[in-house]
Image (tube, grey):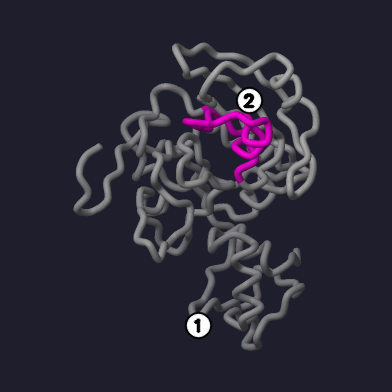
């Protein structure tokens, strides 16, 4: 059955749809010996090459990870300033690429989801999916009730109005107070910008949930784990996609869903 070229390649783990669309625009993809164009439809029997390398036909198996991002790591694959990348902490793949489901800024820690299924990542990040993101936020000072109520109503930001869907106090001592907030969209630095618009200083921000996937207490900073089958199924259900076959389990940690410690070559232990 024919499908759009960028969707076909993304479903085989070569990258996100956005990345693949850029490759097509630059003439780096060929279909049956001709340079591909955006909007081309392909079938499994077509001969596809990306930067001269053939793409295997048939349905690919996939992996899905939860990663506990530390502060100080960027969500890009490379950085001119030499800052560490979250991708350097992930297991290596052959013939596929890790695609992140959304991003976290440099100073935000917590849950990041990764998959080799670019079509899934694209669907989960699409605004129409509306998956809930939950954050633990540490702020400075007492937050009056009227300010909290205002954050649950629309606040005008430079890219349009926004608000927290839920906001609840979560304790704290002295000048530090913790809150848990949820939003249903992934605009850049949205949680920080909403607090800043209300005149509140954020001193720490941790994403603790994305959709139905929770960070949990067992996944330490800088470690990843393979998602459980029920968690994978929930993501595909949320994206209205069919669950593909999983990849082999030879690279998993001991036990189902086990967390693995990751360390870059030459890096000191955390």
Where residue 267 appears, as percent x and y from the top left, is 22, 49
Res. 148 image quadrant: top right
Does 43 appear above or below 233? Answer: below
Q: How many marks?
A: 2
Does 227 appear above or below 72? Answer: above
> CA gap, disc 2 to disc 1?
47 Å
User: What number is the disc on residue 143?
Assistant: none
Residue at the image position 44 percent from the left and 39 percent from the top: 67
Does 148 appear above or below 200? Answer: above
Whether the magenta-drawn stretch holds residue 260 is answered as no
Where residue 160 appears, as percent x and y from the top left, is 79, 46
SS at badge 1: loop
Query: Which one is in front, 67 or 85?
Result: 85
Res. 262 image quadrant: top left
Residue at the image position 53 percent from the left and 63 percent from the top: 14
Where residue 49 appears, as percent x and y from the top left, is 56, 78
Residue at the image position 65 percent from the left and 88 percent from the top: 34
Q: Which residues are magenta?
A: 189-214
Looking at marks 2 and 1 on the same chain, the residue that comes earlier in the sequence is marked by 1
Query: Which residue is disc 2 drawn over?
Result: 181
Camera sees residue 246: no
Does residue 37 appear to the left or right of 20 in the view shown? right
SS at badge 2: strand
Does residue 169 appear to the left or right of 158 in the view shown? left
User: What number is the disc on residue 52?
Assistant: 1
């Amino acid at each position: 059955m024919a499908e759009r070229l960028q969707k076909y390649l993304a479903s085989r783990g070569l990258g996100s749809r956005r990345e693949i669309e850029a490759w097509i625009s630059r003439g780096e993809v060929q279909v049956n010996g001709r340079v591909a164009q955006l909007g081309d439809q392909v079938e499994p029997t077509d001969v596809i090459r990306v930067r001269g390398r053939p793409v295997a036909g048939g349905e690919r198996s996939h992996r899905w990870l939860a990663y506990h991002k530390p502060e100080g790591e960027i969500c890009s694959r490379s950085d001119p300033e030499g800052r560490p990348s979250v991708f350097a902490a992930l297991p290596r793949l052959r013939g596929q690429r890790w695609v992140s489901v959304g991003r976290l800024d440099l100073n935000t820690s917590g849950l990041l989801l990764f998959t080799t299924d670019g079509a899934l990542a694209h669907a989960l990040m699409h605004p129409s999916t509306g998956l809930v993101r939950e954050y633990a936020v540490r702020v400075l000072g007492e937050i009056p009730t009227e300010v909290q109520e205002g954050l649950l109503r629309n606040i005008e930001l430079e890219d349009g109005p926004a608000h927290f869907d839920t906001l609840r106090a979560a304790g704290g001592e002295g000048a530090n107070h913790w809150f848990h907030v949820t939003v249903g969209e992934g605009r850049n630095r949205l949680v920080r910008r909403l607090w800043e618009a209300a005149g509140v200083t954020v001193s720490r921000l941790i994403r603790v949930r994305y959709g139905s996937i929770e960070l949990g207490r067992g996944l330490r900073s800088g470690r990843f784990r393979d998602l459980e089958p029920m968690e994978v199924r929930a993501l595909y259900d949320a994206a209205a996609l069919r669950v593909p076959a999983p990849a082999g389990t030879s690279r998993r940690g001991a036990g189902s869903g086990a967390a693995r410690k990751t360390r870059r070559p030459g890096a000191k232990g955390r």
